[in-house]
DNA sequence: GATGAATGAGGATTCATTCAT
DNA sequence: TATGAATGAATCCTCATTCAT
């Protein structure tokens, strides 16, 4: 096949430069998302200004809008990336073998990576808090929340197969709420205090869930 | 009562007008706080504009600033008044006789009025959420929070006299966090769901606190 | 009536200041409208910026928005005021006695004040041109246009009672179109040229309308 | 034709690529102009963004600026091409034999193709409206306008050889203005209404011009 | 006290245009 | 040539706060 190499050469001439441009674009997107993460952490989503994000990223406002149509799109994309990174990094927490373990171990297996991830990616947390308006959650927050909720419901269902859907929803919401408020405390402290709040979180969940679970899973 | 008219007459020339002014001032403050409560509920603290509050109160922005130096002061005052009203309405929940009762009853005695109060005064709730900025709690939120925290610590201390201050703080923060996130769910639902979440909250707290408590208060 | 003066005094204490404030507000509105008229004339409605209007009025952007909710409202108000001023100044052009006169005199009686008004208030003209987008006329332009159209239809109807509504509409639209395009020429020139275009306009309309009219009004 | 291949071969080594480049360039220009026509029609000239034109053409903004120095140049070129196409398609309307015909026939001969052209090429119309700024016509509008004006003056001159240049200019401007405003109405309607406005336009022009003309041309 | 006009920096977003690749 | 990222001033509009009356 003598023609193939030539074709390859031709293509390279046309795609080498675009590829580098694309790379630059992706770098910018990462830059902007990182900047957004920082700003969201410091000020929360609602108070974060696109100009501030652009400034933090070292670019002009116009550049930001070349990659994101508006402020919410930044949050959505950032939330999505963080979620995906969470899955990749700590997705094994929800693997079936974990679900077979006794509750205390499962809590460790699930919560420790989740907490670690949030400590390393505090922007994730900032996004989950949303606008502060009680009723009106914005879209990305809603997506994040319902995504987590679904996962929790899944785990709970495997633990309490006899629970009604309504019960599952109630319990999942409670668990998620407890987790979120504890995470507030965990992220707001360091060192021993952080450890202590982590332990308390596990205690709360263990004592809350154990009665629902043990009867169901005596091997 | 012969003194009363005289006293009134005597002071009227010099203080009647000031007194009326003061009365009018207090009415204005109440007006403004009520308006602020409404606006905070509808839009959250961060998105509430002072102009909107003034408009809702039927006064001009300048008048608002005659009674409050800035937006946060409104929130602080409103939070304080709501807290005080909570004390007056449901303060007996923390009376000594309640503290002697077994934990389940105490949870009922404490939580039911608290929940009822929040259902009736959703502004209280809006204020507790603060600006949505995770770390940077603003003053009014902080005051409200630490006020509640102190009370919870007090109750816990009477239950677990042997707990260290650090343990008390940790547990109180957890309890408060659990309460707040549950209240989110409670306020976001109605009817049976609201009841269910209320029950869940009590369950969580009961199971969390019982092991710390019962051993201590056997007599 | 001894009480009346007192009452008057009391009232004056409360309303003298507000009255002056209100006067200031109205002055600002006039100022802003005048500024808007200038800017609209120079740049057209679409390209006129609210900041430019505020600057021309010597106030800050915020002040502008204290009196007008948005850019279009300025145009609507300005258009309305100009229209009203036109009615007051030259409204007698449409009086019945005018409608009885022969067509050439009627054209003079109607067009001369109309043209004079537009020469003195070129902003009126700028507003009528709208956004430049063929189909999408904006509201105020539409209102102005249909207002004028109705008047023209009225006059035409008194001249050609036998014309069908469709004919009236067509003719009125033509007349209005001819008037508008001629006014462009009139306003774009001065002195003798302006006179010439005014004469041409009358010629065009006279020759266009005469055949429709004379047969109907011989007595 | 033996020479043709030879010529082609000879020049191919040195000029084939440039020629192809040029051809590609012209294709690009056409692409861009077509896109501009579409955008101008939909949004008007002022509101048309160069980015939108580039996007519609399927190229990048940079490419657009490789062929046109700025937005106005696009309009100028588009107007020119449309004008030329108008000439090519309907240029025979201005041929000498038409000019000899009586006015009614001449109006038909001139206006019908002109109207048809504008119905088929609404971009032409969008361009003629310019920016909406009364006085400040921009270059392209001015060029289009003066081009048309010259033609109208030519025709009028052949009809009224005795008219002074000033008279010619005045009348031509009036005719053009009437034509433009009528075209607005024609393009804004369809079916019977469109026909009606077309007829009205001819009526207006006929009655306006006839008195100037008939005396001059009795063969 | 009360008013409401006034401020002006800052919010999100757009867009004609340029530049490095 | 072609790309698309980059710019930055300009857009409309908001809002906490102040000031003259």
Image (tube, coloured by chain):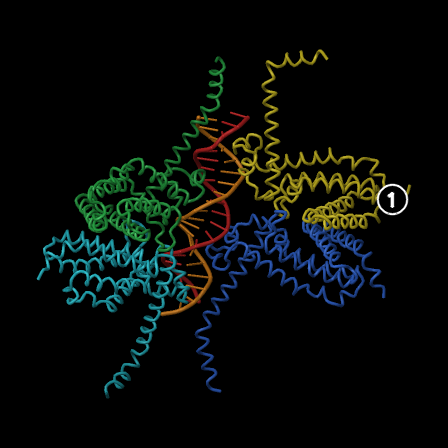
Chain colours: A green, B cyan, C blue, D yellow, E orange, F red
The image quarter in which residue A158 lies: top left
Question: Looking at this view, is C7 or D17 the one in front?
Answer: D17
Say how many tags the image has: 1
Above or below: residue C157 compared with residue A147:
below
Asked whether the viewer can see residue A209, the reply is: yes
Q: Residues within 10 Å of mark 1 (few under 14, many from 20)?
A: few
Instruction: From the top left corner, tell me how far across and down residue C114 is, in percent.
Output: 69, 59
Where, quadrant-wise, is the C terminus of chain C in this rendering? bottom right
User: Closest to the observer: B202 or D12?
Assistant: B202
- The residue under the point 79% across, 60% down is C103
Image coords of residue A18 (percent x, y): 46, 27
In the image, what residue occupies the spot 61% across and 14% down? D12
> Which of the 4 image quarters holds residue C161?
bottom right
Judged left or right of residue C30, residue A110 is left
Q: Position of residue D70 (x, y in %)?
A: 57, 35
User: Residue most toward the right?
Assistant: D219
Tag 1 secondary structure? helix
Residue projecting furthest to the front: A219
Quadrant of res B1: bottom left
Q: Residue at x 63, y 14 (%)?
A: D11
Residue in front for this viewpoint, B131 or C94:
B131
Task: Give the side of residue A178 with respect to residue C12, left or right.
Answer: left
Relative depth, front residue between A44 and F9: A44
Q: Mark 1 belongs to which subunit? A: D
Left or right: where does residue D206 sit relative to residue A35? right
Label 1 sits on residue: D216
- Residue B72 visible in the current orientation: no
Percent position (x, y) of residue B138?
28, 54
């Amino acid at each position: 096949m003598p023609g193939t190499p030539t074709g390859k050469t031709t293509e390279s001439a046309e795609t080498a430069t675009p590829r580098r441009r694309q790379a630059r674009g992706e770098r910018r997107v990462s830059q902007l998302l990182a900047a957004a993460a920082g700003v969201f952490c410091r000020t929360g989503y609602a108070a974060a200004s696109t100009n501030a994000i652009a400034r933090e990223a070292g670019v002009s406002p116009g550049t930001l809008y070349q990659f994101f149509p508006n402020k919410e799109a930044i949050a959505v994309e950032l939330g999505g990336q963080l979620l995906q990174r969470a899955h990749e990094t700590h997705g094994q927490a929800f693997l079936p073998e974990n679900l077979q373990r006794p509750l205390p171990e499962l809590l460790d297996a699930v919560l420790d990576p989740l907490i670690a991830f949030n400590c390393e990616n505090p922007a994730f947390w900032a996004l989950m808090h949303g606008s502060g308006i009680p009723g009106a959650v914005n879209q990305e927050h809603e997506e994040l929340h319902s995504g987590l909720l679904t996962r929790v419901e899944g785990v709970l269902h495997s633990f309490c197969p006899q629970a009604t859907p309504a019960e599952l929803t109630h319990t999942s919401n409670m668990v998620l709420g407890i987790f979120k408020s504890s995470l507030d405390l965990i992220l707001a402290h360091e060192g021993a205090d952080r450890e202590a709040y982590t332990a308390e979180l596990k205690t709360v969940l263990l004592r809350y869930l154990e009665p629902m679970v043990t009867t169901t899973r005596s091997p």
